[in-house]
Image (cartoon, helix red, strand yellow):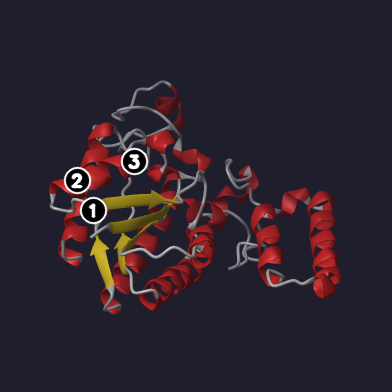
Amino acid sequence: DQRSVLLLGGSVLTPAHGDIQALLSDRLRSRGWTNVVVDSVARLAHSSRDSRFKFQTITSSYDAVVFYHGINETRANHCPPSVYRDDNGHYAYYEMLNVYDRHRHTTPISAIPYTVDYAYHRWKQVLLPRRYVPLDAAPPGLWLKYGTDVKTERAFASQVRAIADLAEARGAVLVLATFAYHVPDNYTRAAFDAHALDYGGHTSPIELWGTPASVVKGIQTHNDIVRTIAGERDGAQLADLERVIPKRGDYFDDVCHLSPTGCILFSDSLADVLSRSLPR
């Protein structure tokens, strides 16, 4: 019988930052899954909200679904509380995604409200560009001070629970993975740019997401949520990768992207959890 696994995540799970998809397939086959398919809808800069949207629109069935998020949401905290929105509407990208979601059952008869809603928000983005957090770039410097106020806790938990509900309804085992990261004690942006840290590579500076303190606090908050929800849900399994993968540069190319050694340990650990969760 064929077994199928779906990966939900951001850039860590993409081919641009390692071969986890292929490695996981190999590791599962070595554990007796002779006929296995590992699909991925992971994309650069995508968050748990993107994964929830994608998962709810996928019609294919999967035996297991792996959730791996935690860092991209931290950028969302770098804004004043008055700007922050749980639906990520303080990003131009998500504001338009939310417009689509509100009208995704639009028919020709109801196209006018969608058009008005779309036009209103596009013009607002043109007129008020500084109101938004960038999707795949460093937060505005004046907003960095807001990052240690982790405002994403409620929204992140909501996305995880929604994905868990979808997995349960579809009869899929859900593997909730904590997010692995590494920030060297001597981290500075200058040391990163000079390739003077212990990273196997120096791919993306942590400042792409925010300040080191705010990014670490955000990831830790999101990991605690993953652990809590995994413990609450009968159909969910925890892959505590943040505790499994050593916080050393030989496992990381930067704060979150894994080195080849890190990808191997990631895939082995995930394969162990999947093997225990599903019979061969």
Label 3 to label 1: alpha-carbon separation:
23 Å
**160 or 152: nearer the eye?**
160
Report crowding for label 1: few under 14, some 14 to 19, many 20 or more residues within 10 A (C-alpha): many
Above or below, 145 against 63 in this view is above
Above or below, 138 against 178 in this view is above
**24 or 59: nearer the eye?**
59
Seen at 83% across and 64% down, the residue is 115
* Spot occupied by residue 210 in the image (x, y as percentages of width and height): 51, 46
Seen at 71% across and 65% down, the residue is 99
Image marks 3 and 1: residues in contact by CB distance under 8 Å: no
Mark number, residue 270? 1
- The amino acid type, in three-letter code, at marker 3 is Val
Quadrant of the rendering where the N terminus is positioned: bottom left
Label 2 to label 1: alpha-carbon separation:
9 Å
Check disc 2 and report the residue beneath it. 27
Image marks 2 and 1: residues in contact by CB distance under 8 Å: yes
Nearer to us of marks 3 and 1 is 1
Nearer to us of marks 3 and 2 is 2
Label 3 to label 2: alpha-carbon separation:
28 Å
- The amino acid type, in three-letter code, at marker 1 is Leu
Mark number, residue 95? none
